[in-house]
Image (spheres, rainbow, N blue to C red):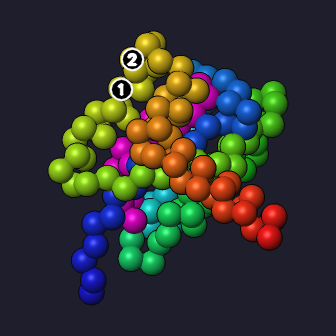
Amino acid sequence: MPYTKVLIHYIWSTKNREHLIGKELKPLLLAHIKENSIKKQIFIDSINCVSDHIHLLVSLGTEQTIAKTAMLIKGESSFWVNKQQILKTKFEWQDEYIALSVSYSAIDKVRAYILGQEEHHKKQTFSEEYEKFLTDHHFETILAKANTNSIKQSTT
């Protein structure tokens, strides 16, 4: 049996960053995601959300991919919320997400960050947080290179 420890910090928002996750929905949504993830053998170490986005720290199994895990959690949870008719509007997650590898030495820091979302967002909006994650983890460099390559290919 292989032994792996691949920790991923996922972040994604509600569709159009709408503030849909209220006091009634939040505990139900988090409990459902945890319960459903156990059934799908997805190990969630930490999870928390605020009105417009969610953070999860997940330990991937040997057969799991970043994309498949995100798809399973996002798709099933939005389906469940809509089936429960908790909201008067349709619940959807944004297609895009951030997934960051987490060193085991940083696990306590990431756990604290995830669990402290309510306090954190008294000082910073999700848009500011999202942009900071993109910048701090050099996603803008990757996107700029991809755009440059795309432009070069279209002009040749």
Give the amino acid at mark 2. Answer: Glu
Residue sitting at x 30%, y 40%: 110
> Quadrant of residue 154 in the image?
bottom right
Q: Does dot 2 land on a helix, a strand or a loop?
A: helix
Write the start and end of the magenta stretch as one range.
43-60
Magenta: main secondary structure: strand
Residue hosting label 1: 116
Residue 97 position within the rendered picture, expressed as x and y whole percent measured from the top left = 58, 48
Mark 2 Cα shell of 10 Å, populated few (<14), some (14-19), many (≥20): few
83 with respect to 68 (left or right): right
The residue sitting at the bottom extreme is 1
Image position, residue 142 (x, y; %): 54, 54
Task: Report if the CB atoms under discs 1 and 2 are less than 8 Å apart.
Answer: yes
Kindly identify the amino acid type of the residue bearing the numbered disc 1: Gly
> Compared with residue 43, is residue 133 higher up or lower down, i.e. above or below?
above
| Quarter occupied by residue 61 | bottom left
Q: Quadrant of the N terminus?
A: bottom left
Residue that numbered label 2 is attached to? 119
Q: Is residue 125 left or right of residue 151?
A: left
* Residue 96 visible in this rendered orientation of the protein: yes
Q: Is residue 24 visible?
A: no
Q: Secondary structure at mark 1?
A: loop
Q: Is residue 107 above or below residue 49?
A: below
Q: Residue at x 53, y 32 (%)?
A: 131
Q: Which mark is residue 88?
A: none
Residue 31 position, x and y percent, is: 49, 42
Distance from Cα at disc 1 to Cα at disc 2: 6 Å
Q: Residue at x 31, y 53 (%)?
A: 102
Q: Going by the picture, which residue comes out furthest to the left?
A: 105
Q: Residue furthest front?
A: 156
